[in-house]
Image (cartoon, rainbow, N blue to C red):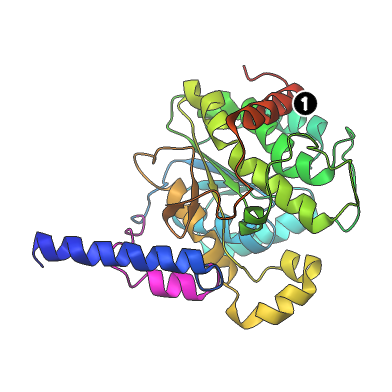
């Protein structure tokens, strides 16, 4: 194919990809990756052994997206660290992973990411026990039915999706510094419906909705990307957010049963949902951080009028997070 024709084909592919994204239902469903993989602009898969010799940690790794992410990283040769609340369940998952990837190396570490004291204990253990960390995937998540607080008194979704991941990354910087490490926050397309609530980060005002709290905390993850990129820049860390689309996971069926039932035939499987996280983690050299990714392409962070935060609000939110977890070293 001539360069001119290749350019036209790639441009048409990007236009089709954008149309899928804007449609939401088509782009977020299983249709999205099925179509995108056939477009000429679809990036290549990571080569076999792309993560050989590297260490990768995944939170919330015992089911759904976390398990699929751990499996994908293990298949690329990484030593995988499962960061979990239940070690009994994680040991069963570890055995399953090793059965599927003979010769792989999987370690289990207990931590409740919403408990900042527990995160500090994990950080101290990992810095003492493992030689390096090249990939850190913050996947642990929850959608509570009622307002719930962490042991430190923080609203649960904010503690689990924002405060715990930021603190954990801060503590693990000694293992990541100078390695071109990649940090991935697994967010949600639901955040597109919410604006940043720097005025009420812990959802103390108004009637509580778990779905809204979840989406607000995911919006905070995305808005804070440039703040976090600056926070960890000196260590050479690149930070990304990925949204997996609509994925058939145990968490979705439990938290949003009606949605899960209505769109069930169109949901992606967990492997398809985790695919871009694994792909980003394996890019060499790492792609520039600070952006939101979906199906191997950086995506807009806002699609609805009124959800865009002004820079001052983002700074206030960043300052609030830093105040809760402490300044990065």
| Mark 1 crowd level (few <14, some 14–19, many ≥20, 10 Å Cα) | some
Residue at the spot 33% in from the left edge and 58% down from the top edge? 43
Q: Looking at the image, is 65 positioned above or below residue 314? A: below
Vertical relation: 192 (above or below) 24: above
Residue at horizontal 87 percent and vertical 40 percent from the top: 150
Q: Which residues are magenta?
A: 28-46
Quarter holding the C terminus?
Answer: top right
Viewer-nearest residue: 98 or 234: 234
| Residue 142 in sight | no
Dot 1 corresponds to which residue?
A: 324
Chief secondary structure of the magenta span? Answer: loop
**Residue 58: percent from left, percent from top:** 62, 47
In the image shown, does 239 or 137 lie closer to the viewer?
A: 239
Reply above or below: 279 against 9. above
Q: Secondary structure at mark 1?
A: helix
Between residue 285 and residue 126, name the one nearer to us: 285
Quadrant of the image occupied by residue 40: bottom left
Number of numbered tags placed on the structure image: 1
Residue 48 image offset from top left, x and y in percent:
35, 56
User: Is 30 in the magenta?
Assistant: yes
Looking at the figure, which quarter contains the N terminus? bottom left
| Residue at x-position 65% and y-position 46% | 219
């Amino acid at each position: 194919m001539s360069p001119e024709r290749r350019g036209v084909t790639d441009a048409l592919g990007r236009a089709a990809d954008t149309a899928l994204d804007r449609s939401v239902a088509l782009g977020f469903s299983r249709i999205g990756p099925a179509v995108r993989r056939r477009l000429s602009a679809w990036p290549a898969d990571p080569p076999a052994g792309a993560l050989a010799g590297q260490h990768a940690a995944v939170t919330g790794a015992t089911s759904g997206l976390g398990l699929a992410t751990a499996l994908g990283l293990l298949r690329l040769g990484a030593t995988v660290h499962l960061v979990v609340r239940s070690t009994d369940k994680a040991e069963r998952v570890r055995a399953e992973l090793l059965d599927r990837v003979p010769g792989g190396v999987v370690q289990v570490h207990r931590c409740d990411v919403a408990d900042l004291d527990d995160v500090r204990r994990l950080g101290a253990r990992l810095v003492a026990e493992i030689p390096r960390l090249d990939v850190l995937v913050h996947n642990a998540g929850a959608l509570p039915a009622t307002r719930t607080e962490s042991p430190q008194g923080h609203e649960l979704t904010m503690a689990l999706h924002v405060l715990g991941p930021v603190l954990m990354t801060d503590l693990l910087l000694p293992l990541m510094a100078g390695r071109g490490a990649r940090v991935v926050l697994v967010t949600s397309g639901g955040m597109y419906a919410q604006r940043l609530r720097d005025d009420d980060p812990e959802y103390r005002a108004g009637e509580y909705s778990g779905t809204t709290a979840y989406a607000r905390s995911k919006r905070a993850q995305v808005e804070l990307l440039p703040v976090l990129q600056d926070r960890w820049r000196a260590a050479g860390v690149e930070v990304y957010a990925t949204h997996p689309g609509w994925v058939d996971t145990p968490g979705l069926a439990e938290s949003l049963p009606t949605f899960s039932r209505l769109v069930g035939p169109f949901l992606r499987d967990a492997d398809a949902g985790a695919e871009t996280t694994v792909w980003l983690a394996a890019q060499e050299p790492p792609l520039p951080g600070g952006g939101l990714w979906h199906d191997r392409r950086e995506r807009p962070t806002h699609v609805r009028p009124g959800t865009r935060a002004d820079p001052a609000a983002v700074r206030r939110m960043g300052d609030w997070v830093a105040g809760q977890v402490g300044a990065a070293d």
